Amino acid sequence: MAEIKITLIGFKCERCNHEWVPRNKKEKPAVCPKCKSPYWNKPRKKKNTKKV
Ligand SMILES: [Zn+2]
């Protein structure tokens, strides 16, 4: 038996690090299925820090 590597296309939530495989690969999920965050694909940026 030969070994093969199967790569699944999935998504990873930037907020809770939850990984899942979508049923519909054509459309990106609106929210993370675990934490329900709509910003699952948007990592936090340190752009808006208002530290003086
Ligand atoms: Zn999440």
Image (spheres, helix red, strand yellow):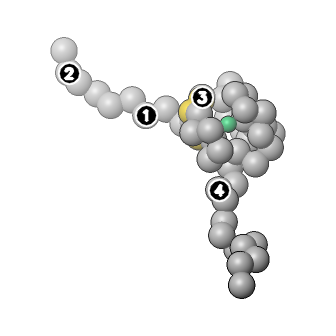
Q: In the image, what residue type sits under mark 1?
A: Thr
- The residues bearing labels 3 and 1 have C-alpha atoms spaced at a distance of 11 Å
Q: Residue 3, percent across and down?
A: 23, 24
**Image quadrant assignment for residue 36:** top right
Q: In the image, what residue type sits under mark 4?
A: Pro
- The residues bearing labels 2 and 3 have C-alpha atoms spaced at a distance of 25 Å
The residue under the point 71% across, 78% down is: 51
Of the two numbered discs 1 and 4 in the rendering, the one whose residue sits closer to the viewer: 4
The residue under the point 60% across, 28% down is: 21
Q: Can you say whether 47 is above or below 18 in the image?
A: below
Mark earlier in primary sequence (3, 1): 1
Find disc 2 in the rendering and name its residue: 2
Are the residues at dot 2 and dot 3 in contact (C-beta closer than 8 Å)? no
Mark earlier in primary sequence (4, 3): 3
Mark earlier in primary sequence (2, 1): 2
The residue under the point 57% across, 33% down is: 19
Task: Please state which of residues 30 and 38 is positioned toward the viewer in this rendering.
Answer: 38
The residue under the point 39% across, 29% down is: 6
Are the residues at dot 4 and dot 3 in contact (C-beta closer than 8 Å)? no
Mark earlier in primary sequence (4, 2): 2
Residue ranking furthest to the bottom: 52
Find disc 3 in the rendering and name its residue: 21
Find disc 1 in the rendering and name its residue: 7
- The residues bearing labels 2 and 1 have C-alpha atoms spaced at a distance of 16 Å
